[in-house]
Image (spheres, rainbow, N blue to C red):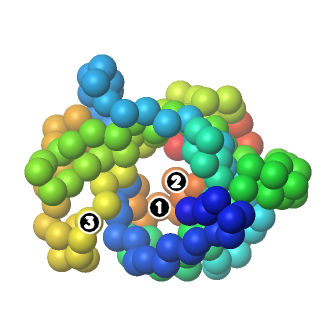
């Protein structure tokens, strides 16, 4: 989080999430939405993921460890000026999407990403879990499609470098 004094804060956590394609789009009315732009400093073949993100008016620099369902994540809030200074370094490795957030159960929320630009009409849904056991036990609702959690083709940094003709194949 960016504080009034210009200092940033860092959030380190373990991310446990599963990602799915969808069978059918759920109703979007009433869901919270956010516009996201992401750019990547790392190549698809790099084990670490270093990402720059603008989420509406918030800006972040994020480092994620290798992994599929479970991996560590360090996120640092940065200023808009810092974002603008770094953004050109991500040229050719970017994605744009609108994220809709909704409740699945009392304890679980989903994040539905509708990609735009060259990745349209790709839509994926992610669910974060408190434990690896909860992730493994999760029974997705009927509107969820194929589980792509372990498929590197659907990682953000891979999609950011994916030629548009490849997207039709995913």
Can you tell which quarter of the image residue 155 is in?
bottom right
Task: Indicate the secondary structure of the residue bearing disc 3.
Answer: loop
x and y percent of residue 122 in the render?
A: 51, 35
Residue marked by disc 2? 154
Q: Residue at x 80, y 58 (%)?
A: 82
Q: Is residue 4 left or right of 85 when viewed as pictured?
A: left
Q: On residue 129, which mark appears? A: 3
Circle 1 packing at 10 Å, graded few (<14), some (14-19), many (20+), is: few
Which numbered circle lies on residue 151?
A: 1
Furthest toward the front, the residue is 5
- Mark before the other along the chain sequence, 3 or 1: 3
Q: Earlier in the sequence, mark 3 or mark 2?
A: 3
Q: Residue at x 50, y 73 (%)?
A: 11
Nearest the viewer among 80 and 91 is 80
Mark 2 and 1 residues: CB-CB less than 8 Å, in contact?
Answer: yes
The residue that appears at 30% across and 20% down in the rendered structure is: 29
């Amino acid at each position: 989080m960016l504080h009034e004094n210009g200092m940033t804060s860092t959030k380190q956590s373990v991310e446990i999430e599963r990602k799915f394609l969808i069978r059918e789009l759920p109703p979007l009315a009433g869901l919270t939405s956010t516009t996201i732009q992401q750019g990547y400093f790392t190549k698809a073949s790099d084990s670490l993921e270093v990402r720059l993100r603008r989420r509406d008016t918030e800006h972040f620099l994020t480092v994620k460890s290798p992994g599929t369902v479970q991996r560590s994540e360090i996120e640092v809030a940065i200023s808009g000026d810092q974002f603008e200074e770094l953004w050109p370094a991500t040229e050719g490795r970017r994605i744009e999407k609108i994220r809709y957030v909704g409740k699945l159960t009392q304890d679980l929320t989903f994040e539905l990403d509708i990609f735009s630009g060259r990745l349209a009409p790709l839509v994926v849904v992610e669910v974060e879990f408190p434990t690896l056991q909860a992730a493994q036990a999760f029974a997705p609702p009927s509107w969820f499609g194929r589980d792509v959690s372990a498929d590197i083709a659907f990682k953000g940094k891979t999609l950011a470098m994916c030629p548009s003709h490849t997207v039709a194949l995913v």
